[in-house]
Image (tube, coloured by chain):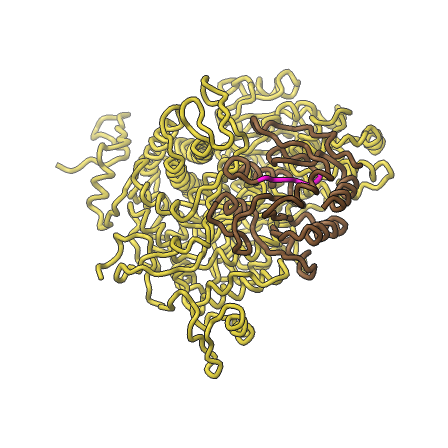
Chain colours: A yellow, B brown
Amino acid sequence: MSELTTGSFSIGDLENVQITINNIVGAIDKQMEKSDEEMGPTPKPGVSSLRDWDHTIFERYNPIYTPMCDQCCYCTFGPCDLSGNKEGACGINLEAHNAREFMLRVMTGAAAHSGHGRHLLHHMIDLYGKDYPLDVGPTNIIAPNVQAVTGIKPETLGDLDIVLNYVEEQLTQLLAAVHAGQEGAAIDFESKAMHGGMIDHVGMEVSDIVQISCLGFPKSDANPPLADIGMGCIDPSKPNLIVIGHNVAAVTDIIDYMEDNDLSDKIELGGLCCTALDMTRYKMDGSAEDQVPKAKIIGSLAKELKMIRSGAPDVIVVDEQCIRADVLPEAQKLMIPVITTNDKVMYGLKDRSNDDVEDILADLTSGKEPGALLLDFEKVGEIAPRLAMMMSEIRKQKGIKALPTEEELKDQVDKCVHCLACEIACPDNLPISEAMKLAKEGDFTKFEWIHDKCIGCGRCEFACPKDIDIVNVIEKSSQKLIRNEIGKVRAGRGPISDPEIREEGVNLVLGTTPGIVAMVGCSNYPDGTKDLFDIAKEMLQRNYIVVVSGCSAMDLGMYKDEDGLTLYEKYPAKFKSGGLINVGSCVSNAHITAAVIKVAAIFAQKQVSGNYEELADYSLNRVGAVGVAWGAYSQKAASIGTGCSRLGIPVILGPHGSKYRRALIAKPYEDQKWNVYDARDGSEMKIPAAPEFLLTTCETIEEMMPMLAKSCIRPSDNNMGRMIKLTHYIELSQKYLGVMPDDWQNYVRMETDLPLAKRQELLKILEEEHGWEIDWKRKKILSGPVMKSDVSAQPTNLKRLCKEA
Amino acid sequence: MVDVIKNTQMHCTYGCKTSKAVQPNVAGKLISKAKRPLFVVGSQILKDEELLKRAIEIAKKADIPVAATGHSMKGFVDADVDAKYINIHALATYLCDPNWTGLDGKGQYDTIITLGHYKYYINQVYSGLKNFSNLKTISIDRQYLQNATMSFGNITPEVLLEALDELIENL
């Protein structure tokens, strides 16, 4: 008897009868058994399966807590004062409570991504069926994170269904551990947080693979088209349809309707946050570089309130994740109807999914309803553009005016009594009072200066005792600047392809490419958007591979260098030394960890399936990659970062990142912690204290530059690699801190590790200040380094991987 | 006398233990009395030359070592003070470890004085120190910091300069 497979069947002569088999019990497990792929020790790991690995990490990298609140208010025993690490009524102390809170933060982020993935997957299976094949470009490892964690090698949409079942079970088990009166050890909440972070990368990968496969996104395209970005790129004379959020599913229906009805040139379609990035990827697969994406990017979360307050949008469509909670009341003030399309954001609006399109349009254009909940995407596709055309006319006729006139601006400014309440409320303590003082004298330049630093949160307005619309004052004062806010972003290209990894892997593991700097995360910057450009420019000039995603990918494109080019136009979008790659939106971050897994798989022939621990160990000891989430604000950023922690990739956050309340920091002075095994014989070997953290924060980008170089140093670097990395570390420290780093000598094993141009000078310092013995005739180090130089050593933290001596 | 404690308004609560408001003359005397003080200066100091001048003066007159966090080291390169760069999150970690021997190898510190940081950032650092160390911490910046042991209130940049002058007189 032949075996049943999934899919649709028609039965012989019976008309109108079709049987659809969605799932066969045990089929995927059977397939896994059949394939040649060897299975590692932990396919579909449970909450405790990778606990030993986590504890190995925490042995060196201490969880550091900086609580936001010293109390616990979880249950009715409380509130309990936990200050000074006291225990509360249930017995939990401040450390464990903060670990629990961090874990919850990570899980919230993971749930946001995998919930997004689940939603997309349901939608695409509805449209294309479970047998629809996955295609992400040239690769034998379609889903590295999925495969490493679950052992499943997905080929169809249906296979991802099983992966998400696993993710959802893990999230439920983790959430259960949050309940009061259970876990008491901070370190085990930490291990659970790591589990949530790892699971997040699986959920993100599923989300992006689904949309890449089904929506015609670029597939590992090394030359994707350039999209417009900036508040200035939107043409205010056309009807403006603005989309906010992260889930592009409904928006694709809008784009299709606009194309089918010849509206694409008549309506300005712009997006905020990751939906915008994904709109520019839609149907761009294999397109020429000069092809124009089907929508424009306005910017990140920080631009949401400002965009609404500008009055430019005629309709706002929201989907899910980073969307301001006050979109509806803000839009209502300016007669902008809001359409909600996802059950995560409904704003209390009436569900009109099953109503007649004309009725809905009538209610929204007349202002009878401020908006509508529409869970039927086809209807969203039709209503949103038609509504934009109608509202544009209506709003013009009604003379809707958004920002204050010059006169009103003056009145507003004159009301200020300089009480400083706004500055205390401002998350960045921006000098609003001083700007008001200057504005009273007719000088608005300080407000222009504030505009870029302002994250558009509106807290100042609530604090102001004089009811000044401070955000409007900032925006009105900066109109000239805003009109010129136009840049370019390369559309997200998706994963790094196998051929690219094959070519670049060796350089990364030996250190001759100085490292991968992954700039990810949100727009809560400490000092404006230009920081990202400055970081990327410095590291690209030094031949690091710079990978970007999400809001960071957007803001990076807002600035031009001395040749008048954005970095996207200047540097190749290839995964090679000196390349600048935009992988895509928030969920595309999985391609960054995937690239690290692929280096181990393709370059070092490591088994992928169910072999997470070994891959993480490889990454920690051999792949010089570092993440930067300079403006991280969200729970999602916490889960992405924690997924990196478990995979052994260090991440640096901006100063606002301290409000995540947990870091992973090692102590370089604890000598005994900086030993690993040599896998060739199980002997212990000393390694340099790098990376010094898996998650930390820093104050300024100037401080971060040398930190980045140091964080890419790995025990496996050969001496050419060490020389290159040390050169950048020393140069960046001198350039940005004005001094030599005080620990550079710790990374030196032999004279050829020293930067060529400085070798003589550095040897002298080693001799005079550190007591090393130098043979000056041969310019050789005779004694001093604590580490031996051995190019074939195989550093590992896992005893089980060692051959017996 | 400059009054710096009149405005200690909080915009959110951090729990049961919040810092005592302190006047500059008292802060100055406390710094002088400390056995193992460390002056932690952040990179915001570089935005105001007058402030940097006073930071250097405090380090010199009280003869205390400077932990230069962020990229504030640039301001101390030729200042003839005992300054070393360190990342502040790492510093906060080591300060909670009784086995750390300090920037100079001579042992753990007993009093931390801070100036020149983002308010929200240093307040988180203080939160770690408050809950997981026995250090005395004094903020002499222009914002009230709930998590320090003692702190100036919310004051203007001009009043801060006056206050620091008074503090220096009392060293």
In the rendered view, does A525 fall on the left or right side of A689?
right
Name which residue lies at 22% across and 37% down.
A27
- Report x, y in % for residue A759: 52, 74
Tell whether position A744 is magenta: no
Task: Write the start and end of the magenta stretch as one range.
Answer: B136-142
**Residue A351 at x, y percent in the picture:** 52, 18
- Residue drawn at (37%, 45%), measured in percent from left and top? A145
Does residue A492 appear anywhere in the picture?
A: no
Looking at the picture, tell me which residue is in the foreground, A34 or A647.
A647
Q: Nearer the viewer, residue A565 or A633?
A: A633
Residue A261 percent location from the top left of the image: 57, 34
Relative vertical location of residue A731 with respect to residue B114 in this rendering, above or below: below
Which of the 4 quarters of the picture holds residue A450?
Answer: top right
Residue sticking out furthest to the bottom: A777
In the picture, which quadrant includes the C terminus of chain A?
Answer: bottom left
Quarter of the figure with the N terminus of chain A: top left
Q: Nearer the viewer, residue A312 or A657?
A: A657
Which is nearer the eye, A371 or A650? A650
Furthest-right residue in this view? A441
* Vertical placement of residue B72 versus A427, above or below: below
Q: How many marks?
A: 0
State the image quarter where residue A391 is shown: top right
- Look at the image and tell me whether residue A169 can be seen: yes
Q: Residue A502 at x, y = what percent?
A: 38, 60
The reply to whether the magenta stretch includes residue B140 is: yes
